[in-house]
């Protein structure tokens, strides 16, 4: 068993755009294991370098800058199983003043149904350690259904101060095209959960007023670039994983269009210019199973500033996609030897990864490989 702090040699394949195999000596990263978690799902940095980590089984951990890990009290009760559990964690843009943390999780309903929710709470240190208080649910998937797939429930704040939430179609296909439900959508809300008056379907009222875009499957990454554009990564069915540029009111086609096939190998029409749907900017076949997304803005890897980094589950890789305005192109795909659940940028510009796993969910820190 490797201990925290051990430097891991990494043999990388630079496979994105015709790349070739590279030796460990030539790879761009040195990789350091700095912790382990139980089924980690998401992470976010606090001011000062502390790290919040969600574990799918319902625990929220605080990793202090010195490496100590503490339990956070006041976490909501979650419905665990399948793809459901405790999910994303992000800070309010004004966290330094209001101490608000936003969490997503799967919640149980009547008769065995379940659905994703988003809540917010205040994070502070109490007498017994870190604690969430004043927890309030501000959004729910509607309707709750049976099953344990495609909750999605990623969260991102935009430069407009609005809260964007990815809501999966719960493996139900057709709800993604139904404006009467918020499954298979990107949702846009005010920071308190109320609906902005300028949403594209606000005049319809009800659930439709929340919706920013529709026609999505299982959306597992949301991130804004420096120009304020919202990018999203999404699992296709059998193939057809996507990077999308999310634009107000657009329909992204699922389940009427996909560059993948159904699991029984039956055909789904590919995206084509005349279909009326917004096509992906980048797609993969076979699948990589994208799990998370950031747009890099740090100083440690200046050559990649403005590019997207994606964690891959079945692909067991860290993937770079080059972004240029509204265009995207595959760049690098580095094998990591395990399912990558989350990628995050540290305050110093290092890349931090969470590996998926019940007991071997390693926290990795990637920094530039030193010469020699």
Image (spheres, rainbow, N blue to C red):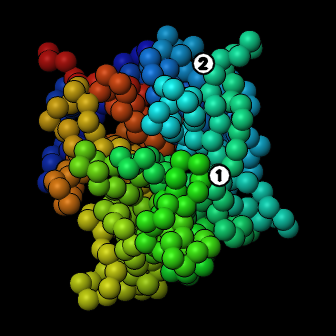
Q: Position of residue 21 (x, y in %)?
A: 19, 43
Quadrant in the picture for residue 70: top right
For this rendering, which residue is in front, 173 or 369?
Answer: 173
Looking at the rendered structure, the secondary structure element under dot 2 is strand
For this rendering, which residue is in front, 187 or 109?
Answer: 187
For this rendering, which residue is in front, 192 or 258?
Answer: 192
Q: Is residue 5 left or right of residue 128?
A: left
Residue named by callout 1: 138
Q: Position of residue 291 (x, y in %)?
A: 45, 51
Looking at the rendered structure, the secondary structure element under dot 1 is strand
Residue 89 in view, yes or no: yes
Q: Give the answer, above or below, for where 293 lies relative to 189.
A: above
Residue 185 in view, yes or no: no
Image quadrant holding the C terminus, namely top left
Q: Position of residue 175 (x, y in %)?
A: 58, 78
Q: Give the answer, above or below, for where 268 lies relative to 88.
A: below
Q: Is residue 229 left or right of residue 49?
A: left
Q: Position of residue 369 (x, y in %)?
A: 22, 23
Residue named by callout 2: 69
Tell me how far mark 2 sits from mark 1, CA to CA.
Answer: 29 Å
């Amino acid at each position: 068993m490797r201990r925290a702090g051990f430097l891991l040699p990494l043999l990388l394949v630079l496979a994105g755009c015709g790349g070739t195999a590279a030796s460990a000596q030539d790879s761009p990263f040195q990789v350091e294991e700095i912790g382990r978690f139980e089924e980690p799902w998401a992470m976010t940095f606090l001011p000062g370098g502390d790290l919040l980590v969600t574990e799918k089984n319902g625990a929220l951990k605080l990793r202090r800058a010195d490496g100590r890990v503490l339990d956070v009290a006041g976490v909501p009760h979650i419905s665990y199983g399948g793809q459901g559990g405790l999910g994303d964690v992000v800070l309010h843009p004004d966290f330094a003043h209001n101490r608000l943390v936003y969490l997503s999780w799967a919640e149980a309903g009547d008769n065995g149904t379940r659905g994703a929710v988003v809540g917010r709470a205040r994070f502070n240190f109490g007498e017994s350690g870190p604690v969430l208080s004043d927890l309030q649910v501000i959004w729910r998937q509607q309707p709750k259904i049976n099953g344990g797939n495609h909750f999605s429930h990623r969260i991102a704040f935009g430069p407009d101060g609005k809260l964007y939430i990815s809501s999966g179609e719960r493996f139900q296909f057709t709800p993604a095209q139904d404006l009467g439900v918020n499954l298979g959508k990107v949702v846009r809300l005010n920071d308190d959960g109320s609906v902005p008056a300028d949403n594209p379907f606000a005049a319809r009222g009800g659930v439709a007023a929340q919706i920013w875009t529709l026609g999505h499957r299982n959306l597992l990454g949301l991130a804004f670039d420096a120009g304020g554009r919202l990018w999203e990564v999404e699992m296709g069915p059998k193939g057809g994983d996507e990077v999308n540029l999310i634009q107000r009111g657009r329909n992204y086609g699922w389940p009427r269009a996909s560059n993948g096939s159904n699991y029984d190998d039956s055909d789904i029409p590919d995206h084509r210019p005349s279909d009326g749907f917004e096509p992906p900017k980048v797609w993969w076949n076979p699948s990589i199973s994208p799990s998370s997304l950031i747009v890099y803005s740090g100083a440690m890897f200046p050559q990649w500033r403005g590019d997207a980094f994606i964690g891959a589950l079945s692909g067991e890789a860290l993937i770079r996609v080059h972004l240029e305005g509204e265009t995207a192109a595959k760049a690098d795909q580095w094998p990591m030897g395990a399912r990558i659940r989350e990628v995050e940028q540290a305050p110093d510009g290092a890349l931090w990864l969470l590996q998926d796993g019940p007991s071997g969910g390693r926290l990795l820190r990637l920094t530039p490989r030193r010469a020699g």
